[in-house]
Image (cartoon, rainbow, N blue to C red):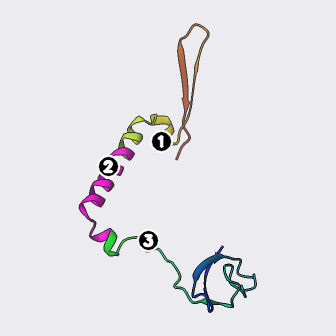
């Protein structure tokens, strides 16, 4: 839901209101009852992908965070069973005696 900025002509108060796009604009101030008008506000946007200053020239703390994230994802990938990581169908079960059996079937690529 979009956020709209309003300014009261009587008390000079500026406030934000979450409203549907189809909703009628407010006509009176919630504090003093004076007339309000909707202000133009810049739309927020996020720069994604490469080619932006933040991603191309990261600070030292950003570099450390990216390295830590890579190490965490590598350690998670290392602990994933090979059958699950390769996409093969693998089942394992434990018999009543406690012996573990596994049968793996792979599908041709």
Q: Main secondary structure of the magenta part?
A: helix
Residue 34, given in percent of the width and then of the height, sits at: 69, 89
Residue pictured at 43% horizontal, 71% vertical: 48
Residue 98, given in percent of the width and then of the height, sits at: 55, 10
Q: Quick one: label 3 or label 2, which is nearer the N terminus?
A: 3
- Report the residue marked by disc 1: 86
Q: Nearer the viewer, residue 64 or 100?
A: 64
Looking at the rendering, the stretch of residues picked out in magenta corresponds to 55-73
Whether the residues at callouts 3 and 1 have beta carbons within 8 Å, the answer is no
Depicted 15 relative to depicted 88: above or below: below
Q: Residue furthest left?
A: 60
- Report the residue marked by disc 3: 48
Of marks 3 and 1, the one in the foreground: 3
- Report the residue marked by disc 2: 68
57 is within the stretch colored magenta: yes
Marks 3 and 1 sit apart, C-alpha to C-alpha, by 30 Å
Residue pictured at 66% horizontal, 79% vertical: 31
Quadrant (top left/top right/bottom left/bottom right) for the N terminus: bottom right
Q: Quick one: label 3 or label 1, which is nearer the N terminus?
A: 3
| Neighbours of disc 3 within 10 Å: few (<14), some (14-19), many (20+) | few
Depicted 3 relative to depicted 98: above or below: below
Q: For residue 24, what is the image quadrant?
A: bottom right
| Neighbours of disc 1 within 10 Å: few (<14), some (14-19), many (20+) | few
Residue 56, given in percent of the width and then of the height, sits at: 29, 70
Q: Nearer the viewer, residue 20 or 102?
A: 20
Q: For residue 65, what is the image quadrant?
A: bottom left
């Amino acid at each position: 839901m979009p956020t709209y900025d309003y300014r009261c002509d009587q008390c000079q108060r500026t406030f934000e209101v979450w409203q549907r796009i189809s909703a009628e604009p407010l006509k009176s101030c919630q504090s003093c009852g004076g007339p309000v008008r909707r202000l133009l506000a810049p739309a927020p946007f996020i720069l994604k992908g490469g080619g932006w200053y933040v991603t191309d020239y990261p600070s030292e703390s950003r570099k450390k965070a990216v390295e830590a994230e890579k190490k965490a994802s590598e350690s998670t990938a290392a602990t994933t069973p090979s059958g699950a990581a390769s996409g093969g169908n693998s089942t394992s079960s434990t018999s009543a005696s406690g012996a573990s059996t596994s049968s793996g079937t792979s599908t041709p690529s």
